[in-house]
Amino acid sequence: MRKQHLFLRSTVSIFLLLFSAAFGSLSATEIWIAPQASVPPSPLNRAVDFLDMFDSGASWRNAAQVIAVFKLYGSYLEHAPQEQVNKIVQDLNRRHISIAVEAGVMNNPEATKPACGGHGVEGYSTTARAKLISKKIKNAGGLIAYVAMDEPLWFGRYYKGLPGKQPGCRHSIEQVLDLVMPVLRVYREEFSTVKIGDIEPSGVGYQPEWKDDLGKWLSGLRDRLGRSISFMQLDVPFSAGSQQVTAALSFYNQLEVLRAQNLVGNIGIIYNGMPNDRTDKDWIDSAKSHIRLFEHDYKLHPQQAVIQSWAPRPTHALPETAPESLTGLVLYYASQSRVGAK
């Protein structure tokens, strides 16, 4: 019997060592996850098993162990029934996974002539929406640990608009700062410990004077918030071609410079597939190739890896044992990288 116990203990120890080696508990990299979520009949996409993730026996136990943050879309939280939010928050609390909200934060401007920005342009919102999102999370017993601003620099400063659609306003940096502060103030009043971060597309990296703009943007946020933003996450539209990768590398390198100046905390990269991938396997394979491109070929070491989709694929978040699911991609990333323990 004693030999059996020793054998069992040795077997468990070996398993734990292998698990630690595979999932690299010694590194500082955080894994975030953000599955597609919307409320029907919204035209936005939704993983077919999104709500199943929050059942007690949902098949992502190992993935949950390496996921530090679950990012929810503000557009979902605005329209989701309270009972759905309750289910999500209670399960994430049980799993000790922090909650982030990705949302527009540019307060709808007063009517402009000619009309620009506001409703119909990504990145805009209202203080009322921020209060609604905060109330739903609070009523569910949750805490918003992070607010991820939805590309305010891009949509407030550089975005020109699409044909036949509302154009962008092309504001100055100071004007964009003026727009974001009322909404950010709501989240900070509702959640005193919330950390503010930003998501921006790699296209920022080929705008005129973008380095100067980025420095002004981050220093302006620090001045108005009283602290540097917690993170900057890069959104790379890979389908737009190699110039986006080149721009992303320039953007990333400049963020390293600004991080050394304490203007930003962590640097993250959003890993996803191509919007026109025809199958879940195609999408996952594309996402894996993007992970290898940045972290193996270019040797980047982001502090945050964001496994995220807003596209039709992959259709499933579960189970983690399926290589074509979003949680399966989390485990792939964890097996390829050394990620931080929660």
Image: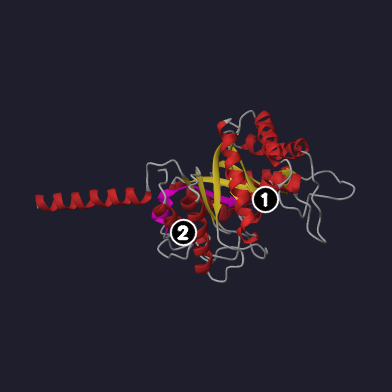
What color scheme is it? secondary structure
Mark 1 secondary-structure assignment: helix
**Residue underneath mark 1:** 203
Task: Check the picture and name the quadrant holding the C terminus.
Answer: top left
Q: Position of residue 181 (x, y in %)?
A: 71, 36
Let me know if residue 298 appears in the view: yes
Residue drawn 37% across and 47% down? 24
Mark 2 secondary-structure assignment: helix
Residue 31 is labelled as none
The image quadrant that residue 37 belongs to is: bottom right
Which portion, as a residue range, is magenta? 60-74
Q: Position of residue 128 (x, y in %)?
A: 72, 44
Q: Is residue 256 left or right of residue 61?
A: right
Mark 1 or 2 closer to N-term? 1
Q: Is residue 26 left or right of residue 289?
A: left
Q: Position of residue 288 (x, y in %)?
A: 48, 59
- The amino acid on which the numbered mark 1 sits, given as a three-letter code, is Gly
Q: Could you say which is closer to the camera, residue 21 or residue 250?
A: 250
Q: Is residue 29 left or right of residue 313?
A: left
- Is 66 covered by the magenta stretch? yes
Residue drawn 66% across and 55% down? 79
* 3D distance between C-alphas at marks 1 and 2: 26 Å
- The amino acid on which the numbered mark 2 sits, given as a three-letter code, is Leu
**Residue underneath mark 2:** 329
